[in-house]
Image (spheres, helix red, strand yellow):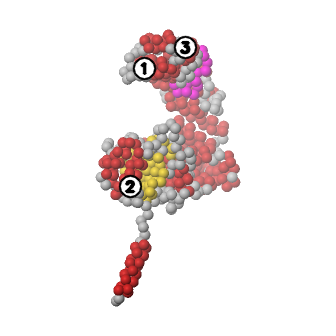
Amino acid sequence: MSRIHRFIFVLAACAASACALGAQPVSPRQTVCTITVNSSDEKEAFRRHLSADRFQFVELVERGRPDWLESARRKGIQCDVLIISGHYDGGDYAGGNEFFSEHVDSHEFLPVDEMERVACSEPEAGLFSKLKEVYLFGCNTLNPQALRSDAAEIARSLVQSGHAPADADRLARSLSARYADSSRDRMRHIFRNVPAIYGFSSVAPLGPTAAAYLDRYFQSGGSRDIATGRAGTKVLGYFPGRSLTLARGLSDADADAGYRRDLCQFVDDRLSTVQKVDALHRLLSRDMAEVRLYLDRLERYASLLDATVRQAPDVARALDAIARDDDAKSRYLQFVHASDRPAVRARLIALAAELDWLTPDQKRGELLAMIGATLAAPAPSAADVDLVCRLNDDHALDGGLAALPAITTTGVGHAAILACLGSERDHERVLQALSSARDDDVQIAQVYLRHHPIDDVNELRGVTSGIVQMADSAAQVRALNTLAHQRLSDRTTLEALTRLYPVAKSVNVQRAIAGILIRSDYQQIATPELVRALQEHRLKSPDGQDLIDVLIRRLPVS
């Protein structure tokens, strides 16, 4: 072969080789999605250690835009890794769960309800559909404690729905697994089929501390494990205290997979309103103990069915089918009457009215019957008082006193419930209870006064006089703290409190007085003599400056 031919052959071979190399697919970069509603420290730790040629970072939060998660969906973003940084409120299952910022000037937050809506509405190529791992940097994000449906509560509901106690205990254990509802369970439901979800079973470290732990983990070679789709426990060892924990996303084989499907029926964007109402009807046909487990979701969905939605012909027909379902209605109302928890019973009654199973007059009658049962208890609690006062905040139950059965026990709890319904005599008794030596009585009076602040100056002076004469310092502090929420402006009352300050036997009493004055119209009594009295008679504080010092600085006198 001549030189020229060999040269041409080599060129052709090189070209073929280059083409072959070019035909090899280039591995795409993996997408690390970040949701930063508080600290960015954790996100930056990941960014420092993950190679830019392997990973691209996408911040999903768009400042000033409330629907930023939905915006990310519409852009077609698909996350391989998700990092959420924010304080977490996981106190209940009724819609209060959210990631939020500690900064008062920050308006960004992430409701778990919104995460759930996105997850339930996901197409095959959705925002969360490719996730290999999730990092939840917030306290209690993977807390395993049941939020509402522990086995004892479920067994109680089963007995109320007609099951024998022995059967109820057995069924309760099964239902506890099928209707798992802890913060950890909810995250597993949202991040379905995700191999690794990292979060905290209790307290999480602050952002800078968490970032330091992550730096150590990545420096030990941890970056090799990111976005592999394999759950690993190595990172857990770099977080002292062992609060960081690992879970996997829900699979279709899990006991609570059906529960997730049921819940998704109410938030899936792909379902019509009629389909959702039909799902509501199907749930109401189940054992009422199971219906009780869905009460939060049923309430929230029913509240979305406003008058405009209900007027649509197909929706009206679907709702009418529920209203005419006499079997479900009968079993539901039997369950309502068997319920021995006033707060739950009141919620069940409200839902029955939303479903047109109770007329307004029937709803009122059911609520009064529930209140009558509460009054029959030996000692209604502060929570019972709060419930009745809330139920009558709009005065819809005024005039219902005559419908209540006569009661023989008349403790402060009974008096407060009757006062919530408009009894003037019992109102006076609750005011007197504020200066009681019994902690329970004071708590009940506090709850009552949150709903019915003192607006009569003579009543206010009488209550203050009783508090000033109290002998027990701890009870006196509780009573004074109640007055602090009344925003006092009566000069006679304020002067009575300033006379109590020098003779107080506890620094906590003095602090409580300062707390009242700070919230009051204190300009009326601001004098150099008052400032001297506050300084000269203050008892020694065991923990430095307090409300008394704040009050002295605020008083507009030299």
Q: Is residue 72 left or right of residue 142?
A: right
Q: CA distance from mark 3 to mark 2?
A: 63 Å
Chief secondary structure of the magenta portion: helix
Near mark 2 (Cα within 10 A), the count class, few <14, some 14-19 or many ≥20, is: some
Q: Nearer the viewer, mark 1 or mark 2?
A: 2
The residue indicated by pointer 3 is 525
- Where is 315 relative to 492, above or below? below
Q: Is residue 387 left or right of residue 79?
A: right
- Indicate the secondary structure of the residue bearing disc 3: loop
Q: Residue at x 48, y 58 (%)?
A: 78
Name which of mark 3 and mark 1 comes first in the sequence: 1
- Where is 241 relative to 195, above or below? above
Mark 3–mark 1 CB contact (< 8 Å): no
Q: Nearer the viewer, mark 3 or mark 2?
A: 2
The residue indicated by pointer 2 is 50
Name which of mark 3 and mark 2 comes first in the sequence: 2
Q: CA distance from mark 3 to mark 1?
A: 22 Å
